[in-house]
Amino acid sequence: MSLSVDAPQEETFNLAMNYFNEKRMKISDSTPPHYIIVEFGSWTSMSFDNGKGEVEVGIEKKDGKSYVNLDFDFSVNYLLYFIIAIISALIVYVVLSSFVNTWASGISNPLLRSDYLSRANLYVISGALIVFFLGILVSVIEVSMTRKRFIKEFNMFIQSLASKKE
């Protein structure tokens, strides 16, 4: 994602640093006046628009303007939701399988029991897969909302301060 700012590169860098400090984001690395790495989001107050991630901010000067490139990295967030989705799917599978086995124990005919178990196993696996994919979907939605919120707030901050300085 790239944003255009009507300000010199050094000033844009300072505006970006002010924004990150004001929002209490952790600045992992910075090389004035063109590069910043920032960690944002929180594990303790996770919401759909506050996912944990990292953004690399590259600031380039061109034609008297600055261009801010935002490169987001949500790999830690994706990994967390992937692990949660796998664990949830396994729990669903174990719980449903135990119910199916309990119900199947009442069937005395071995052929009917095996037919029942194979059909029920299909439903159990389907349920576990649905839970898994819902977990992944939640992660994708959270990342999308976080990215949109971050870009919107950052752009509004940078543009408002850049226009005030003119």
Image (cartoon, rainbow, N blue to C red):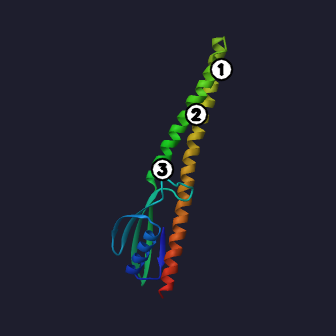
Instruction: Locate residue 114: give its quadrant.
Output: top right
Dot 3: what SS?
Answer: helix
Dot 2: what SS?
Answer: helix
**Residue 103 badge:** 1
Residue at image coords 59%, 45%: 134
- The extreme left residue here reads 31
Q: 44 or 149: which is nearer to us?
A: 44
- The three-letter amino acid code for the residue at tag 2 is Val
> In the rendered image, which residue does mark 2 sit on?
92
Spot occupied by residue 163 in the image (x, y as percentages of width and height): 51, 84
Q: Earlier in the sequence, mark 2 or mark 1?
A: 2
Residue at image coords 55%, 69%: 152
Tell me whether the residue at label 2 lies in contact with that at label 1, contact meaning CB atoms closer than 8 angstroms: no
> In the rendered image, which residue does mark 3 sit on?
78
Spot occupied by residue 14 in the image (x, y as percentages of width and height): 40, 77
Q: Earlier in the sequence, mark 3 or mark 1?
A: 3
Calculate the distance from the C-alpha at mark 2 to the C-alpha at mark 1.
17 Å
Tell me whether the residue at label 3 lies in contact with that at label 1, contact meaning CB atoms closer than 8 angstroms: no
Q: Residues within 10 Å of mark 2 (few under 14, many from 20)?
A: many
Spot occupied by residue 92 in the image (x, y as percentages of width and height): 58, 34
Calculate the distance from the C-alpha at mark 3 to the C-alpha at mark 2.
21 Å
Dot 1: what SS?
Answer: helix
Calculate the distance from the C-alpha at mark 3 to the C-alpha at mark 1.
37 Å
Spot occupied by residue 98 in the image (x, y as percentages of width and height): 59, 24
Q: Residues within 10 Å of mark 3 (few under 14, many from 20)?
A: many
* Residue 115 in view: no
Q: Earlier in the sequence, mark 3 or mark 2?
A: 3
- The three-letter amino acid code for the residue at tag 3 is Tyr
* Residue 111 in view: yes
- The three-letter amino acid code for the residue at tag 1 is Trp
Residue at image coords 58%, 35%: 128
Tell me whether the residue at label 3 lies in contact with that at label 2, contact meaning CB atoms closer than 8 angstroms: no
